[in-house]
Amino acid sequence: MAAKVKIVPTHPDAVLPKYATPGAAGFDIYAVEDVIIQPGETKVVPIGLAFEIPFGYELQIRPRSGISLKTPLRIANSPGTIDSDFRSEVCALVWNSAETLWEFDEDINEYFPIFAKTVFTIDEKEVESPSGEVVYGAYIIRKGERFAQGVIAPVVRAQFEIVDKLSETERGGGAFGSTGTR
């Protein structure tokens, strides 16, 4: 099943969507600028593309599994939903889930973040910071780097009905792990 999706490049360095393999559910999403993300920080990462998603579908922005495994970078609102009536440039919200490292200064009895002159890339190499001091554990998503994936998915719209009572189930009213782990 294929949905026709119109795209407009909004940046001269935008990489057009493509699927890496015939069986891939998601297409690669590339950054169009360098973005440094400090520990605990969420940043907007532009991708340089606007989409016209057909009515009845959405574009989901999801993390790449290798990046989630090897770095603390996460798609903050995963999956981020781009609605069919949105027409501006799509960006991803990327969160660096690493915690800031702190050191204690005995002279003034206060804690300060540990600063570094390098940042990590998503392939875990250290690079010189292009924009001054950064906190240790900061990551840089480089321009032209694949950092997320997009999935075009059908949307089911609900018809809500007010009732006096909901049907009973075996589960009952339990929540948050009420069915156990085994």
Image (cartoon, grey):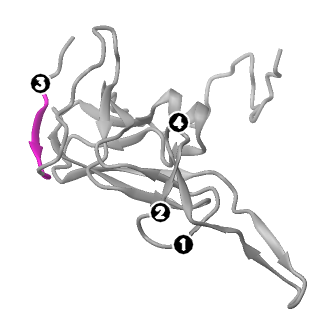
Q: Which residue type carries mark 4?
A: Val
Secondary structure of the residue carrying tag 4 is loop
Q: CA distance from mark 2 to mark 1?
A: 7 Å
Residue in the image at 20% along x and 52% along y = 89
Picture disc at residue 163: 4
Q: CA distance from mark 4 to mark 2?
A: 58 Å
Residue in the image at 48% along x and 40% along y = 78
* Residue 7 part of the magenta-drawn span: yes
**Which portion, as a residue range, is magenta?**
4-11
Picture disc at residue 129: 2
> Which numbered disc, 1 or 4, marks the residue closer to the eye?
1
Give the mark nearer the N terminus: 3 vs 4: 3
Q: Quadrant of residue 35?
A: bottom left
Quadrant holding the N terminus: top left
Categorize mark 4 by other alpha carbons within 10 Å: few (<14), some (14-19), many (20+).
few
Picture disc at residue 6: none
